[in-house]
Image (cartoon, grey):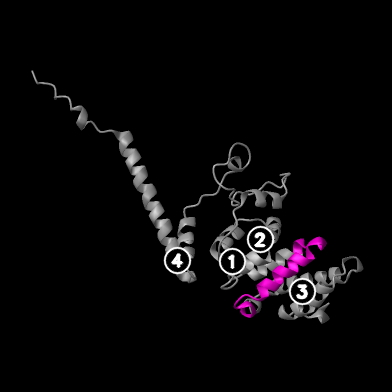
Amino acid sequence: MMEEPQAMNNSEVLDFRELERELAIAVAADEKYQRENAAKFRAIHQKVASYEEFRDIVAASNLKPLERKDKIGGDRKQPWNPTATTSSSSKEPACAVLQESLPEPRNASEFSRDWRRTDQKERYNFLLQLGAKKLSFIFHAEVCSGLLGDFLCVFDEYLQDMQVGEVMEILQCLAKTPRFDLNLVFLSKDEMDHCQRLFMKLKTLVNDENKADGKLKQTLQPLMALYKVNESRN
């Protein structure tokens, strides 16, 4: 009579759950490496100004968008991530949400990341929240490609009469950034139309007798010249 095969020792028994866990860890590590490696190439291509910007771009490659349940209800374990789309029925003012939860960007790469994740209305509040002084610091090297046109479109769409001074200060600070004239040249026709309309709105509000401000009137005309706005078009 044949003897039954000797039972395997416990140490020799395959633990499939452990193998699955190790495989998942290895896959996650490889994906992380690929994301960070791609981010390094992007940073080099963008010719970032400092190692800090390079490091921040690489670190941001591992960020994941929050689900709605992470933003509303329960304790938040990390700052609000605007990648998750805000419901139009939300009763929270956009500016209040930004002020409470969104960390201010420290450099141009962080600003660009947050800008891409923020919807149009919140972008207006985002710019006003940062203000001219902070934006001057963020864009000390230059305004990133395409952003100037975005700013002009957002200001044209959402300009509020009580915020004319703040918007003009931001427009002034942008006009002082390096390569501003080059950014202006690359504005699309639609973006230039927004620019034209924005300055006509500013002129109307500044000239309004109820909003009269000598300093703003003196500032507006040179600012229009910097942005190549032609009043004869209107």
Q: Which of marks 3 and 4 is nearer the N terminus?
A: 4
Which one is closest to the eye, mark 1 or mark 3?
1
Along the viewing direction, whichever of 10 and 43 lies nearer the viewer = 43
The three-letter code of the residue at mark 3 reads: Gln
Say if the magenta span includes residue 172.
yes
Q: Quadrant of the C terminus?
A: bottom right
The image's mark for residue 51 is 4
Q: On the rendered structure, is 172 left or right of 18?
A: right
According to the image, label 2 marks what residue?
130
Question: Helix, strand, or loop for circle 2?
Answer: helix
Residue 11 appears in which quarter of the rendering? top left
Q: Which of marks 2 and 3 is nearer the N terminus?
A: 2
Q: Earlier in the sequence, mark 4 or mark 2?
A: 4
Q: Do the residues labelled 3 and 4 touch (CB within 8 Å)?
A: no
Residue with the most extreme left position: 1
The image's mark for residue 196 is 3
Q: How far apart are marks 1 and 2 (CA)?
A: 10 Å
Image: magenta residue range = 157-182
Residue 211 appears in which quarter of the rendering? bottom right
Q: Distance between the residues labelled 2 and 3?
A: 24 Å
